Amino acid sequence: MNLTEKILAKAAGRKTVEAGENIWVDVDILMTHDVCVPPAIDIFKKQFGQNAPVWDKNRLVIIPDHFIHTNDYYANRNVDLLRQFASEHQLPYYYDVGGEDYKGVCHIALPEEGFTRPGEVLFGTDSHTCNAGAFGQFATGIGNTDAAFIMGTGKLWVKVPETMKFIFEGEIPPYVMAKDLILQIIGDIGVDGATYRTMEFAGDGIMNLDMESRMTMTNMVIEAGGKNGVIEPDEVTYDYVRQRTNAQFEPVFGDSDARYHSVRSYQCEELLPMVAKPHSPDNKATVVEVAGTELTRAYIGSCTGGKTSDFVAAARILKGKKVKLDTYVVPATTEITQDLKNITIDGQTLWSIFEEAGAKIGDASCAACLGGPPDTFGRLNGQEVCISTTNRNFPGRMGSKQASVYLASPYTVASSAITGKITDPREYLTEGTPVADAV
């Protein structure tokens, strides 16, 4: 069996499973947020009873993050419903907005709080729940009805997906980031190329990535239609997890003779900085092919591109320079916000580097990545041409249907913010480019 099959077999209490089988699995963690939990709560109460308890309050994690820093009445009402439900069930892992418990984007807050553990099964009411597959677990997005069923039973009926394997051989060039790798793949197979399949990433190129970069890879498998993304755990994984939780976990690994739907290999030395052109994540081009395209806005943030390492990368480019565009910096979580204030490059904090460059720094949240209410920070409101580290560039995704969005790595976005046009980051990455003092 391959890695995903091994995890699902373990969760089903079986020795083996095969792609295409439908099985019941025990759920380790259910995550939901402010957009989806109100209807899920309604379904749960209708099906299990108004006063029914959740199956395990220690396995339900609720993280408001999407439409939160807003005056919108309906968005605020959703958060009120979360508070009420969390209070009724005395949920220990509800991270409220506006207080010390607030975390930020759910997909990054989950690993920060130790909920992403090798060998486990995690479901979430958000398509980018696949982010957690970077930790060697089965993680995927589900709908509100499935979430309500898990709330009541702790189980879910799952079809075992086929697995597509992507191997990156050799050393990744210093001007290429994980975002470039995943954009290359999505461009190669299309937005439906992995529909209801696992996308497993392997090879020296992948295993030499840090955990945040691995998350970038698995985060965007849904942009190819993938059911889940996964990377085998190693000491890098274990170190990250053990620093954040004392919970026990049991990693599993694929067999050497495992079967795959397909295997695709990449030579890392041939990789280049990439973009996804409007209006689809699979509309790929190398940065060289679109260099010089005039821009009006740059955006660095989201669960895909708003992690600490993403900001370190951008700050390396922006240090000592000024942006020519409206440039927005939005940390994914409050922990990352603190990193911006504490991590330095040549004695200067990342926060200070961004401020001096002329960027606008927002509160930790999904912010403009999902468009949101009109008062959402960084939301597109006109015919902007934006380059962004986010995960989707469909019309209206960041607010305005008239806007055009190019997806790119933090290196490319920062370089383009300086020039006002799409720019190859190799123009700014030299042997003298500063490195963060501590990450």
Image: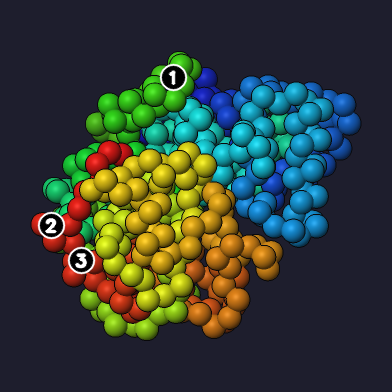
- Tell me the crowding category of disc 1: few under 14, some 14 to 19, or many 20 or more residues within 10 angstroms, Cα based: some
Q: CA distance from mark 3 to mark 1?
A: 42 Å
Q: CA distance from mark 2 to mark 1?
A: 42 Å
**278 lies left or right of 145:** left
Q: Nearer the viewer, mark 3 or mark 1?
A: 3
At horizontal 82% and vertical 27% (from top left) the residue drawn is 88
- Tell me the crowding category of disc 3: few under 14, some 14 to 19, or many 20 or more residues within 10 angstroms, Cα based: some
Q: Position of residue 257 (x, y in %)?
A: 26, 33
Q: Is residue 134 above or below residue 170?
A: above
Q: Position of residue 273 (x, y in %)?
A: 25, 65
Q: Nearer the viewer, mark 2 or mark 1?
A: 2
At horizontal 67% and vertical 65% (from top left) the residue drawn is 375
Residue type, label 3: Tyr
Q: Secondary structure at mark 3?
A: loop
Read off the residue under disc 2.
432
380 or 146, which lies in front?
Answer: 380
386 or 361, which lies in front?
Answer: 361
Q: Which mark is residue 249?
A: 1
Q: Which mark is residue 428?
A: 3
Q: Secondary structure at mark 2?
A: loop
Residue type, label 2: Gly
Q: CA distance from mark 2 to mark 3?
A: 9 Å
